[in-house]
Image (tube, rainbow, N blue to C red):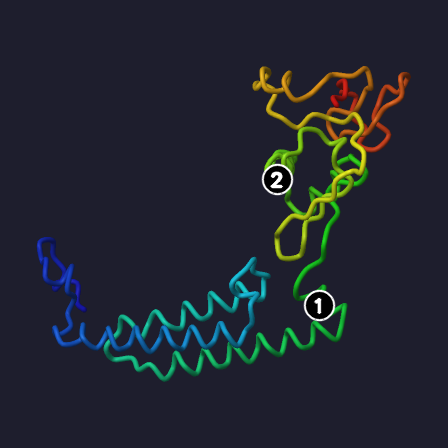
Amino acid sequence: MKKEDIHFGDWQRMFLGDVPGGFYWEVVLRIAIIYIVLMVSMRLMGKRMASQLSRNEMLALVSLAAAIGVPLQAPDRGILAAVVIAAVVVFIQQMLASLASRNQRFESATQGDMTVLITDSTLNLEKMKVTGITKEKAFSQLRSNGIRHLGEVKRLYFEADGSFAMIRNTQARPGLGILPEDDTDFIRQVCRPTDVPVCKRCGLTLGRDDRNCGKCGSDERVNAVI
């Protein structure tokens, strides 16, 4: 389209485009065919495509989305190209899944690794930094599982697919509180303060004479709650 053909107020071009009206009936058929292609493709790629996506699965989904966009909007583009792209994406995804199931190193390289964010009620700040997970993000995830302080948590895993998995302590111990500090009324209702000092930064239990945290080096301390 030439620039002189574009001007404000050309409502037909803006809403209907420069295609004949009959094309919109064709679009209905194109959408139906593409929908079936996508449904079959996602079915062949397995149930994982309907749950939390890994990086490879996200790439496959984006590739399928890019493939179907053009034939739906461009009357001069056929559907066959989208079908071929979908077939190639499914083949690559299936091949990667097969190789990952046979080789642990290949699986780690393509799918990513699981990371331990909390170990025995203490934050692993170095690993959190590597994965890009902030304290508030981790605390938010814990609060969504009904956790009030780190003493209730044995492990928090950041899975390769981006989801979180938590294991509770069999018996809660005093730990760093994770509830918002300005929600004082609720904190008094569900938590009881103790005289056990913990690192304010990572939650490590400190000794009475410890000036700095032995894990993260912070000199900030607070009393744990239970």
Quadrant into which the N terminus falls: bottom left
Residue 17 point in image, percent of width and height: 16, 66
Which quadrant is the C terminus positioned in? top right
Element type where label 2 sits in the image = helix
* Image coords of residue 154 (percent x, y): 78, 40
Q: In the figure, residue 2 lies in which quadrant? A: bottom left
Mark 1 closeness class: few <14, some 14–19, many ≥20 residues within 10 Å: some
Query: Disc 1 to disc 2, how far (Cα)?
Result: 26 Å
Give the image quarter of residue 218.
top right
Residue that carries the numbered disc 2 in the rendered image: 141
Name the residue located 71 percent from the left edge and 67 percent from the top edge.
Answer: 107
Q: Residues within 10 Å of mark 2 (few under 14, many from 20)?
A: some
Frontmost residue, 170 versus 218: 170
Is 192 above or below relative to 25?
A: above
Q: Which mark is residue 48?
A: none
Residue 107's label in the rendered image is 1
The image shows residue 110, relative to residue 173, as above or below, that is below
